[in-house]
């Protein structure tokens, strides 16, 4: 069990004096205290207690080559000598933009920002400006960052969530204006008929449908092609745009999940891997729609966007050095690591007669302490017993050298070896067996 009177506990005591709750990031706050990291190298991190942990979270999917990748580090060090940020443009921004536009058929142009939250907010504002409409439709339970509209119905509970095919719009943060209910429609994942109804009801008020093809908080089930078709065709029918959030799923292939699932969004939100380990975001898409971000003659843009650290040369340099290494062979290796982990762990669960399962695709996975068929957020949502089991799994895995978040969602980086995968499989199967005894 992780030590509760060691260096991490001391740091957490100290943190609570100057930081409300003890950390700026909700997801690091695990019981009894956060894990404080001393360093990361390749697939492994070392915490301040000196424990070596296999990192299968990778900063919530943003690290894809491994920690402290030599090529990224070398490029960033060279840029550090030349300065970190200027209030003027640099050419490396153009290089990263060109690389992404070349790879993704639906991205003619891209505008960078500093996070996935900002990317989703920018895409929503662009869709509103382009269509002149106020409303979006999104999937129940799907996480898209912390913009008011994007976080609607992120984790509703049964007392408030409404009918399965007509979910209620629930504000996430206290104090969110009640107008949110008129500005966001909610659809269940993988329910084509409900999606059609909700999008049609939003009709001429609907600026865009916001979709993640691999939503982590919906448990990463496969997306039903009929659901994709329903969203795209109904959005087109009512004159709304389709925004695909590929903040996580862009790690599934050189053109993201859209090329695998067969969806052609008007706008795509990116972040995480395109920053090579540094804070980043980007909105890309059709030239006509992207023109809302461009200054028109002497006039300001329809959707002005900027930011002190936007497209700073450190992030752009790191992102370029990362993306240049992600060729077909790299994605094939990531797929094979992910497949080995999923098939190995599912076989281990089956062999031990455990009612657990693992979902996911490519380098992404999600471990579930149940065998329910998962198609929607309501299927994936943990009961309080399951949530407690997952928290225990997270904690006990630390003693077996694995760092898995208590969400059960994780991913692999390219520095992971087959031996790392086998360690992960054994550690999870053994711990799951202990927890279900
Ligand atoms: C699908 C998705 N969209 C958006 C975001 C927000 O990205 P960021 O944390 O960079 O703001 C996340 C973050 O995990 C995400 O998973």
Image (cartoon, rainbow, N blue to C red):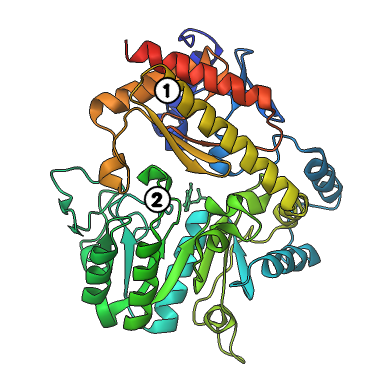
Depth check: 108 or 195 in front?
Answer: 195
Instruction: Determine the residue positioned at 78% across, 44% down.
Output: 72
> Where residue 114 is drawn, which disc sits there?
none
Q: Is residue 125 above or below residue 161?
A: below
Residue that mark 1 sits on: 349
Judge whether residue 155 can be spotted in this image: no
- CB of residue at label 2: within 8 Å of ligand 1? yes
Is residue 376 toward the left or the right of residue 129 in the image? left
Query: Dot 2 surroundings within 10 Å: few (below 14), some, or many (20 or more)?
Result: many
Residue that mark 2 sits on: 143
- Residue 31 quadrant: top left
Instruction: Determine the residue positioned at 60% across, 50% down.
Output: 251
Mark 1 element type: helix
Depth check: 343 or 437 in front?
Answer: 343
Q: From the viewer's perspective, is the residue at label 2 or at label 1 nearer?
A: 1
Is residue 337 toward the left or the right of residue 149 in the image? right
- Residue 401 quadrant: top right
Q: Position of residue 81 (x, y in %)?
A: 86, 47
Quadrant (top left/top right/bottom left/bottom right) for the C terminus: top left
Q: How many angstroms separate mark 2 from mark 1 (CA)?
A: 28 Å
Mark 2 element type: loop
Depth check: 123 or 114 in front?
Answer: 123
Q: Earlier in the sequence, mark 2 or mark 1?
A: 2
Q: Position of residue 302 (x, y in %)?
A: 49, 82
Query: Dot 1 surroundings within 10 Å: few (below 14), some, or many (20 or more)?
Result: many
Q: Is residue 94 above or below residue 42?
A: below
Instruction: Determine the residue positioned at 61% across, 69% down.
Output: 111
Judge whether residue 171 can be spotted in this image: yes
Q: Position of residue 340 (x, y in %)?
A: 59, 32
Q: Is residue 247 above or below residue 386?
A: below
């Amino acid at each position: 069990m992780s030590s509760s009177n060691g260096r991490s506990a001391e740091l957490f005591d100290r943190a609570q004096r100057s930081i409300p709750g003890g950390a700026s990031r909700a997801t690091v706050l695990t019981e009894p205290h956060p894990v404080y990291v001393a360093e990361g190298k390749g697939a492994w991190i070392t915490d301040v207690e000196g424990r070596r942990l296999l990192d299968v979270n990778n900063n919530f999917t943003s690290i894809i080559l491994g920690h402290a990748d030599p090529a990224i580090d070398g490029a960033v060090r060279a840029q550090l000598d030349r300065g970190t940020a200027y209030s003027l443009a640099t050419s490396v921004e153009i290089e990263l933009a060109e690389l992404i536009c070349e790879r993704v058929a639906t991205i003619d142009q891209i505008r960078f920002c500093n996070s996935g939250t900002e990317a989703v907010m920018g895409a929503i504002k662009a869709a509103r400006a382009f269509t002149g409409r106020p409303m979006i439709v999104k999937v129940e339970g799907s996480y898209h960052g912390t913009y008011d509209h994007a976080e609607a119905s992120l984790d509703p509970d049964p007392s408030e969530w409404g009918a399965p095919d007509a979910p209620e719009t629930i504000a996430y943060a206290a104090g969110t204006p009640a107008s949110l209910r008129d500005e966001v429609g909610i659809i269940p994942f993988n329910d084509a008929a409900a999606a059609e109804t909700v999008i049609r009801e939003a009709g001429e008020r609907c600026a865009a449908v916001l979709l993640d093809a691999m939503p982590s908080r919906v448990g990463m089930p496969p997306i039903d092609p009929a659901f994709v078709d329903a969203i795209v065709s109904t959005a087109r029918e009512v004159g709304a745009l389709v925004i695909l959030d590929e903040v996580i799923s862009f790690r599934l292939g050189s053109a993201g999940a859209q090329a695998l699932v067969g969806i052609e969004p008007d706008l795509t939100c990116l972040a995480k891997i395109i920053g090579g380990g540094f804070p980043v975001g980007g909105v890309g898409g059709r030239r006509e729609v992207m023109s809302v971000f461009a200054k028109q003659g002497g006039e300001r843009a329809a959707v002005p966007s900027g930011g002190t650290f936007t497209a700073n040369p450190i992030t752009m340099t790191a992102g370029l050095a990362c993306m240049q290494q992600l060729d077909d062979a790299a994605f094939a290796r990531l797929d094979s690591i992910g497949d080995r982990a999923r098939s190995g762990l599912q076989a281990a669960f089956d062999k031990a007669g455990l009612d657990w399962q693992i979902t996911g695709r490519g380098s992404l996975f999600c471990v579930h302490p149940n065998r329910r068929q998962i198609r929607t957020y309501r299927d994936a949502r943990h009961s309080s017993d399951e949530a407690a089991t997952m928290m225990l799994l997270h904690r006990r895995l630390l003693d077996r050298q694995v760092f898995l978040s208590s969400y059960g969602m994780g991913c692999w980086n390219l520095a992971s070896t087959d031996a790392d995968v086998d360690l992960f499989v054994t550690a999870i199967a053994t711990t799951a067996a202990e927890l279900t005894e």
